[in-house]
Amino acid sequence: MFFINPAYANTFMPPEASQFAGPLDSLYSFLIISSLIACVLVIGGFIYFAVKYRRQTENDKTAYITHNNVLEFTWSFVPFVIFMVVFAWGWIIYNDMRTFPEDSLEVHVVAQKWNWSFLYKSGKESAEEMVVPVNKPVKLIISSKDVLHSFYVPAFRIKQDAVPGRYTALGFTATKKGNFQIFCTEYCGTGHSAMLAKVRVVSQEEYEEWLRQGDPYEGMSLAEVGQKIYSQRCFVCHNTTDQPLVGPGFKGIWMRERTFVKGDPTVADENYIRESILNPAAKIVAGFEGKVMTPFAGQLDDKEISGIIEYLKTLK
Ligand code: CUA
């Protein structure tokens, strides 16, 4: 539509890895370049007139200012046309983003403080990364278990709030293979800046192969499974030392007596840890009033919970 060279205005942009990235960057470049031209014209004209018509003698008087129809129409109509172009251009891209092709691959994205999980129709669940095939339309169905989060992939130029109590959607087609960063871009508490994940874009064959891989913990001991889950899901709030972060530090917690805001003390055994993962509000450790973790019920299976228990036993 317009000839512009985005190479100059876009050097600070992330890689272009979805079908929206190119068109959006062109629009963005157009905005930057047209704003720059307008800025130079207005500020330049301002300086030029200030110098040219400066007061030179004591006798200089302000001239009677009249108006100029042609000039006034021009400086109103030209910006109007530019704004309408930007509006139409933006609307076309937005409409594209909100139209999900029928054959889209659907992936459920679940946000919770402070991590992302991805659920596939095959029943496969993934925590650390979302894997999608290249050049295939993907529709994300996004929800949140606790507060407002926002799913953001800069390289895809897409962003959508995750809202508790409802589903939102986001579509894209990845055009480049590789790993791309996912951010949470709605402030959601202490662990907000660590609420990260990756999109891994692969070929259709690699994607199908990845879907078939049943057990992500094959060949790992239970404690190793627990350590892996810790590094994906727990590290934002829990240290592996005895120092508290958002929640208590994990070192030495195994079989130690825990005292609570309410109720009798309990020894930190298997049942206590299981309950604290699935229903953290049941027993709040004294000193952590008001810092309730979002429940992991439905997020972790029995093997994963056992893995965490075995991992905690190793943190002596
Ligand atoms: Cu989740 Cu910020």
Image (cartoon, grey):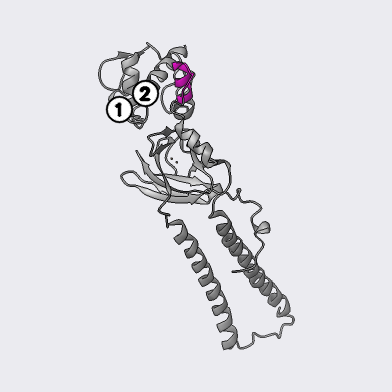
What amino acid is labelled 1 in the image? Ala
Quarter occupied by the N terminus: bottom right
Tell me which numbered mark, 2 or 1, is placed earlier along the sequence. Answer: 1
| 105 to 101, vertically: above or below | above
Please say whether residue 302 is visible from this viewpoint. Answer: yes
Residue at the spot of label 2: 287
Cα–Cα gap, marks 2 and 1? 14 Å
Is residue 199 in view? no
Residues in magenta, as a range: 217-229
- When asked about the image quadrant of residue 215, the answer is top left
Prevalent SS, magenta region: helix
Residue 56: percent from the left, percent from the top?
74, 80
Rendered image: mark on residue 281: 1
Relative to 136, 43 lies left or right: right
Which residue lies at the image location 40% right of the left edge and 50% below the top edge? 169
What residue appears at the point 37 percent right and 34 percent down from the top-left corner? 123
Residue 224 vertical placement versus 156 (above, below): above
Q: Residue at x 49, y 33 (%)?
A: 210
Q: Toward the viewer: 193 or 177?
A: 177
